[in-house]
Amino acid sequence: MGAHMRNNHIKNTLARTIKHARNLANNRQGVAAIEFGMVAPFVALFMIGAINLFDGYQGAQSYQNAGTTLVDLVTRHETTFGDAERDNIFATAKALLGEYGASGDFEICITSIANIFDTANDSTLTIAWSKSNVEGGEMSAADIANYDIPNIPEGASVILVELSGSYEPYISTANLGSYNYSRYFIRRPRFLDSIPYGN
């Protein structure tokens, strides 16, 4: 008798378990909740990645637009470019870049590269002057080879403005952390062969 009762108890327990499993399988709300729980982390990661990529693209565009504006401002000088003008360009760069230029490693360098008249009649380029917002960040003659400088006739010059810095989005992930930007812009002076520098 005891064995018979145990078998009935097992059958009843098994029947109840099967019934609960069927009810759970037929309950679409439960399935939807499980599916959402499985998909939600991937959706969240995708959204974070999309936001980071868009933020990074916005930063790249800001550097591009700022550099184009800054080199245009410098090349429009018709007289001596001095410390006051340099500081104004540095301040303008920070204002144009906003949060993308707020990092502690942001650098801007303004350089006049010239092909001076000489008896050798060669195309050797020299640094007329170079100014940076970071001590030691000025450009040297050895650095010229690192840039794609257009042909400069003797007695003429170009202005090179270089911007660099890093930016970390508000929401970052292991794969999409900080962005490092580095852009340079070259243009000939508009009104002078060479823009002089003086205090």
Image: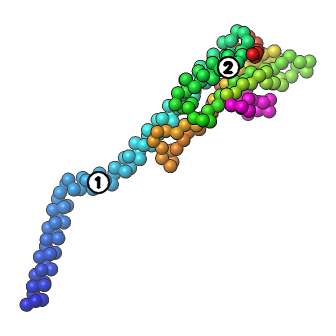
Q: Residues within 10 Å of mark 1 (few under 14, many from 20)?
A: few
**Disc 1 element:** helix
Q: Residue furthest left?
A: 1
Q: Which mark is residue 16?
A: none
Task: Quote the CA–CA distance across marks 1 and 2.
Answer: 59 Å
Q: Residue furthest right?
A: 119
Q: Is residue 110 magenta?
A: no
Q: Position of residue 114 (x, y in %)?
A: 79, 20
Determine the main secondary structure of the stretch shown in magenta.
loop
Q: Which residue is mark 2?
A: 86
Q: Position of residue 133 (x, y in %)?
A: 67, 28
Q: Position of residue 192 (x, y in %)?
A: 73, 10
Q: Amino acid at mark 1?
A: Glu
Q: Quadrant of residue 22?
A: bottom left
> Which contiguous range is marked in magenta?
134-149
> At x 77% / y 22%, what residue is drawn?
129
Q: Which mark is residue 35?
A: 1
Count of numbered circles in the view? 2
- Foreground mark, 1 or 2, reads 2
User: Can the viewer see residue 187?
Assistant: no
> Is residue 40 placed above or below 159 in the rendered structure?
below
Q: Is residue 141 magenta?
A: yes
> Is residue 90 placed above or below 22 in the rendered structure?
above
Q: Amino acid at mark 2?
A: Arg
Q: Position of residue 7 (x, y in %)?
A: 13, 84
Give whichever of 98, 113 is nearer the camera.
98
